Image (cartoon, grey):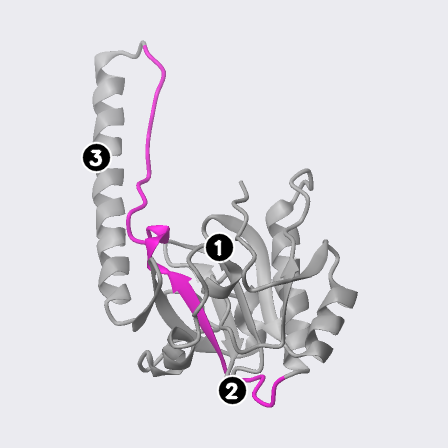
Amino acid sequence: MLFGASVLPADDASPAAWITQAWRGAGGTVGALVPNNYRSVLRVAAPDSAIEDWWAAYRDVYTMIAAVGQRHTTRPDTAWFAVWEGHGFGHSITRLAWREPVDDDTRRALEDRREALRVESERHNAVIRAGLLDVPTFDMPDRRHYLLTGPVSAVTLLRYPDSQDAWRNPDLFWPDGGQWFAATDVDFWSVYVGGDDDLIAELADDASTESKIVDLARPLEIED
């Protein structure tokens, strides 16, 4: 399965139709990222960059959001995950380099190995690209996303199509019924969560990173 064993491609893009109508904010603002029909939006910051296992700590942010979110939906077994197509799945290359000087026989052997790796990478990428054609997509301003489905808890089990050992955070995810909505973007790491007052209060209490309520008109901050 392209994005891991815990999620499947959606049957079609219709579960995302409601959100494409609810992005009404100006470009580059919270209101262009989170649907505008929630009472509050909480910005949950990413972990400090000095943390040694930063990626695991970032996944913990999603674990927390999913744990709280499951208590605020009647359909915890059905959620929707959107992954931006621009992440470049199906374009990875396995590289081989060596330090000169080497003798002619060694160089030929290394060049043959490099060519074999190139051919294998292209074959692997072709399989991924073909599989992605079967995943429905939908558009938001300046972004097109693949749409996947699984339980809310599957947010920490997504995988890169070209590396099944690596976790892939979704760019957007929400439960069936849309009681809340969590979003990030390739240009930053904070997660913006829209929901009712009770959900927002629980998230703020449980967050291990900085969190604060933000206005829909607030500009999205670029984060390296």
Question: Is mark 1 in CB contact (under 8 Å) with mark 2?
Answer: no
**Mark 1 falls on what kind of element?**
strand
**Mark 3 falls on what kind of element?**
helix
Sequence-earlier tag: 1 or 2: 1
Q: Amino acid at mark 2?
A: Gly
In the rendered structure, the answer to whether residue 65 lies left or right of residue 27 reads right
Q: Nearer the viewer, mark 3 or mark 1?
A: 1
Residue 71 x %, y %: 68, 82
Which numbered disc covers residue 115? 3
Sequence-earlier tag: 3 or 1: 3
Residue 186 x %, y %: 45, 51
Which of the 4 image quadrants contains residue 43? bottom right
Per the model, the C-alpha gap separating discs 1 and 2 is 31 Å
Above/below status of 87 relative to 39: above
Q: Counting other residues with Cα less than 10 Å from the Cα at mark 2, is it few (<14), some (14-19), or many (20 or more)?
A: few
Q: Amino acid at mark 1?
A: Asp
**Mark 2 falls on what kind of element?**
loop
Which numbered disc covers residue 194? none
Magenta segment:
73-100
The residue carrying mark 2 is 177
The residue carrying mark 1 is 165
Taking the magenta stretch, the answer to whether it contains residue 146 is no
Question: Is mark 3 in CB contact (under 8 Å) with mark 1?
Answer: no
